[in-house]
Amino acid sequence: MKNIVAGHVAANTTEFIELALGTPVELWLGVEGESEMERAARLDAARDILADNPDLPDRVSQIAAEAIETFAPELFNVIPLPRPCGRRRPSRKAAAA
């Protein structure tokens, strides 16, 4: 099955994400060993992109949620854990005494 985004065929997962986001993943995550100057330039570019596309965080969240729902739906199976009864943590005052 081919992964097509915006009329382009993605060769791999990273390319699919880049096509879906419209930006390279490294822009948001950085790269290992980048200098402070490179980091500052990358963050400046990211701020410009966010200023031009204020709905980008919402689109990214939607893409991530859809990917999780499709490929790892068990991550959305969240249940509250029971609170332990009868055991209380010592207060800071008791610990300081």
Image: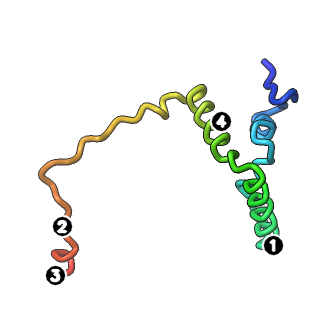
Q: Residues within 10 Å of mark 1 (few under 14, many from 20)?
A: few
Q: For residue 60, which quarter of the picture?
A: top right
Between disc 4 and disc 1, the foreground one is 4
Q: Are marks 3 and 4 in contact (CB under 8 Å)?
A: no
Q: For the residues marked 2 and 4, what is the alpha-carbon distance in whole angstroms?
A: 44 Å
N-terminal of the pair, mark 2 or mark 3, is 2
N-terminal of the pair, mark 4 or mark 1, is 1
Between disc 1 and disc 3, the foreground one is 1
Residue assigned mark 3:
97
Q: For residue 59, which quarter of the picture?
A: top right
Q: Which image quarter is the N terminus in? A: top right
Q: Position of residue 86 (x, y in %)?
A: 12, 52
Residue type of the residue flagged with mark 4: Ile
Q: Residues within 10 Å of mark 2 (few under 14, many from 20)?
A: few
Tell me the SS state at disc 1. Answer: helix
Residue type of the residue flagged with mark 1: Met
Which label is found at residue 63?
4
Q: Are marks 2 and 3 in contact (CB under 8 Å)?
A: no
Tell me the SS state at disc 3. Answer: loop
Q: Residues within 10 Å of mark 3 (few under 14, many from 20)?
A: few
